[in-house]
Amino acid sequence: MANEFTATDVFGQNVVAKTKTWIDHVIKRHPEMAGQEHRVKDAIENPGTVSQGNTPSHRVFAGRRIQGGGFAYGGKRVVAVVRYDPAGNGSLTTAYFTTLDPPGKVLWTRH
């Protein structure tokens, strides 16, 4: 299966965004993410915070807020949800724009 992109998270673990997941889940449910692969990769590699996801195998990477007052992205951030297998390999499960801080216990914060 082809990959849309790969990234290394702040914990040094590899994360893969599979093309099928990107198209069939992320773009179908969040069409505003089309062409935003670079922002999702940046959220994983350079997040503002990382929180525990809904399960122990999921982490939520919240990118830094996008500067500016533009209608489309100003003040928003990209959130990328990654599921890790027992070996520590990550797979992107979803990504979206939001103005909210993700819920869950904060595991890591940029200083």
Image: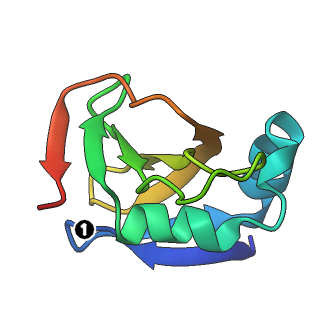
Q: Position of residue 103 (x, y in %)?
A: 35, 22
> Which image quadrant for residue 30?
top right
Left or right of residue 72: residue 76: left
Asked if residue 60 is positioned above or below residue 64 in the image, the reply reads above
**Residue displayed at 54% across by 57% down:** 66
**Quadrant containing the N terminus in the rendered view:** bottom right
The residue lying toward the viewer, choosing from 102 and 65, is: 65
Indicate the secondary structure of the residue bearing disc 1.
Answer: loop
Left or right of residue 37: residue 11: left
Name the residue that disc number 1 marks. 10
**Residue displayed at 57% across by 44% down:** 76
Left or right of residue 10: residue 33: right
**Quadrant containing the C terminus in the rendered view:** bottom left
**Residue displayed at 27% across by 38% down:** 51
Tell me which amino acid carries mark 1.
Val
Left or right of residue 36: residue 44: left
Q: Position of residue 97 (x, y in %)?
A: 63, 42
Q: Position of residue 16 (x, y in %)?
A: 53, 68
**Residue displayed at 37% across by 63% down:** 89
